Amino acid sequence: MLSGGCFCGAVRYETDGTPFHETNCHCEICRRTSGAPMVAWFSVPKTGFRLVAGKPTRFRSTALGMRSFCPQCGTQLTFENDNLPDEIDVTIVSLDDPDRLTPKDHTYVRSRLQWVKLADQLPQYQETRREAHKK
């Protein structure tokens, strides 16, 4: 089981789902909603994710995307894509022990900031890994 929450502790979650799609996302929306050059995410089945304290604020960041944040401290917690209704993305650094998961690739590198240099040898996808596999 993985557990985590926001900086101030008002919102807490647990997940017993098996993590997948661990990534560093470089899209402009992730950057702007977090105030960071990229956001590290992991996905789990939505059935394995549960809030155990507090209630995050949710807002639609795109026509298909819903994000959640702590209403007190602003920590970004989750992302849900309407086209993937059975999974939820969770920010790796909101985990109590973020070292338990390591990003396995970089997505949306077409949007990467020019001053971010990627030297970790992880796979890089111009957009999502799903789009790369369609070609």
Image (tube, rainbow, N blue to C red):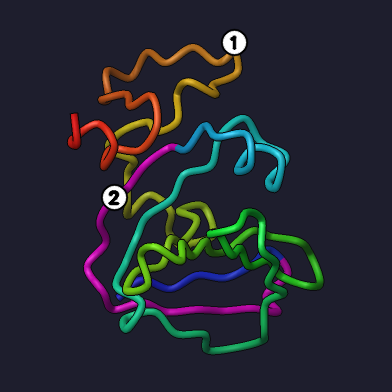
Q: Which amino acid does label 2 sit on?
A: His
Q: Is residue 30 left or right of residue 93?
A: right
Check the image and report above or below for 7 versus 122.
below
Residue 4's tag is none
Q: What residue type is labelled 1?
A: Gln
Q: Is residue 19 left or right of residue 40?
A: left
Decide which of 130, 94 is in the foreground and name it: 130
Q: What element does badge 1 sit on?
A: loop
Check the image and report above or below for 85 versus 36.
below
Per the image, the residue denoted by label 1 is: 114
Magenta extent:
8-24
Task: Identify the residue at image location x=26%, y=74%.
Answer: 17
Check the image and report above or below for 63 versus 127.
below
Residue 12 sits inside the magenta stretch: yes
Q: Earlier in the sequence, mark 1 or mark 2?
A: 2
Per the image, the residue denoted by label 2 is: 21
Q: Position of residue 117 (x, y in %)?
A: 49, 12
Q: How crowded is mark 2: few (under 14 residues within 10 Å), some or many (20 or more)?
A: some
Q: Position of residue 120 (x, y in %)?
A: 33, 19
Decide which of 93, 84 is in the foreground and name it: 84
Q: What element does badge 2 sit on?
A: strand
Q: Position of residue 135 (x, y in %)?
A: 18, 28
